[in-house]
Amino acid sequence: MMPTVFENIGQRLFGMCEEAGNMVVLFVESLRECRRVAEHPRRIFIQMKSIGNDTVFIASAISFFIGMTLALYSGNALRTFSYTDALPGLVANSIVKEMAPVITALLLAGRIGAAIAAEIGTMRVNEEIDALYTLGISPIRYLAMPRFVGCVTMLPILVTYASFVGIFGGAIIATAHFNMTWGTYFTAAFKSLEMSDVREGLLKATLFGAIVAVVSVHRGLSTRGGAEGVGRAITSCVVTCFIWIIICDYFVARFMMSS
Amino acid sequence: MSQQPTQQPTYDIEARDLRKSFGDHEVLCGVNLQVPKGKTFVLVGPSGCGKSVFLKHIVALLTADSGEMIVLGKDIAALPPTELLELRRHVGMVFQSSALLNSLTVEENVALGLTEFKEKSPEEIRQIVNEKLALVEMADTNRLLPEELSGGMRKRVAVARTLALGPKIILFDEPTVGLDPLLSSNVDELILDLKEKVSCTNVVVTHDMITAFRVADRIGMFHEGAITALGTPQEFANSKEPVVREFIARNREWRI
């Protein structure tokens, strides 16, 4: 008998709830395994190095151009009100609180998240994950924890770096098009930033790092169906990360504003 | 007549009415099986009949819908995760695809289970690794990557990795599949060698009757999700069971 539309919707919803539950379990287990961080420094260092190496160049380029575009548009808009003095503060706040964390996290999802899903997905279809179980090794400890620690520690570092690069990009436009000196721009930019702004950016970066790690490891571990399945896992990992990062971004902003 | 003390048979693996379904398809339909300690038990049957699914239940990679799987005296469904991981260290499995970690060298693969638990010094681990690699005739391959090995060599390294933990049970999932007759014969000899040198219980899943007759102490025929015939290789060869006769005949035709 063909399932009805309602049955299909119900099954889909049930599947989504189950998947969300599995991700929460994976998050908690990864967090619990973090007490063994000191036992596996090499494995964690390899992850951190790979995340940093693979992301830093693209993060620099993207942040630099976003900083410039942001300064160009907002500078022009502010000029109509003769209020270009506010440009450095606007660029710095937008970059530190929103642009750098979100763009770098999306980049991390596309570059590192996809690679993690592909690596663990391939291990899954080649029975390497099953082999780990039979050796008495928990894949959460062996695979998930180092990647979780790597993403959660490296993303705030990358976001901090990307913020500086983005503000610098804005400075080039501000000095070239809006008659500002380097000194005025940077003094105004850093003066406009409060500790809470930096905290918000770093909180977002940490949360987004956790999202990328958990989603990509989960997608890798639940891969089924050979090479085609690995491809599906990668696509699904990137899309899911993007959605969760944007949703989480809104709620953190709401939370920080209200507090 | 003096009364002899009754000796209870000791089984390393005991399946009781084991059932498993994937969706509407029932793969294991009430499997009952006992594998005595120290023996080599071979499970034969056509491809896709559920042999590998049964094997994965022994090491709890799959959990049954109902029934019991007792391994080394413990009901694995009732074990908490930490005890299950501990039990798995006594049950080695050699996968159909060998399942070596491609990013690690032969030495790192064989040492994997030992390094993870940090119970032995690096020197002791190196010694064990070299000893196990020599046992499977793969000495001096320590630095090679799995992609540099042939199918038969990968199988041997997988066996060495399993042996490194000193298991009480070794499970072989289709050990000769995809190998040419000479390599298949090598793998058969390796299993026979292990029977002599390492005193552990072996369970071999295969559809190759040559392997089955060479290595088995007992053979079980898996058909439509249950064990339909069970006996020594001799009893199995003389079986009147139509499914067994047909399977042996087909195997012979296929070999020719």
Image (cartoon, coloured by chain):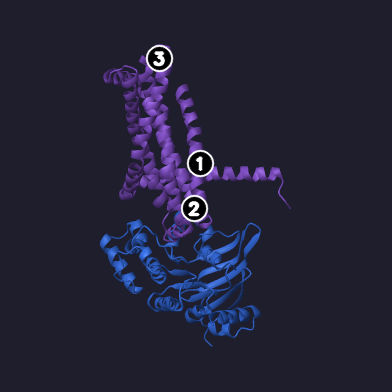
Q: Quadrant of residue A200?
A: top left
- Residue denoted by label 2: A230
Q: Residue furthest top?
A: A82
- Element marked by disc 2: helix
The dot on residue A79 is 3
Provide residue B243's location: percent of width, then percent of height. 64, 78
Residue kind at label 3, given as amino acid type: Arg
- Whether residue A31 can be seen here: no
- Element marked by disc 3: helix
Q: Which chain is blue?
A: B
- Disc 1 and disc 2 on one polypeptide chain: yes
* Separation (CA) of disc 1 from disc 2: 14 Å
- Element marked by disc 1: helix
- Residue denoted by label 1: A239
Q: Quadrant of the C terminus of chain B?
A: bottom right
Q: Residue furthest bottom?
A: B1
Q: Which chain is purple?
A: A
- Disc 1 and disc 3 on one polypeptide chain: yes
Q: Say few, some or many: other residues with alpha carbon within 10 Å of mark 3 (under 14 / 14 to 19 / 20 or more).
A: some
Q: Quadrant of the N terminus of chain B?
A: bottom right
Picture residue at 43% right of the left edge, 54% below the top: A138
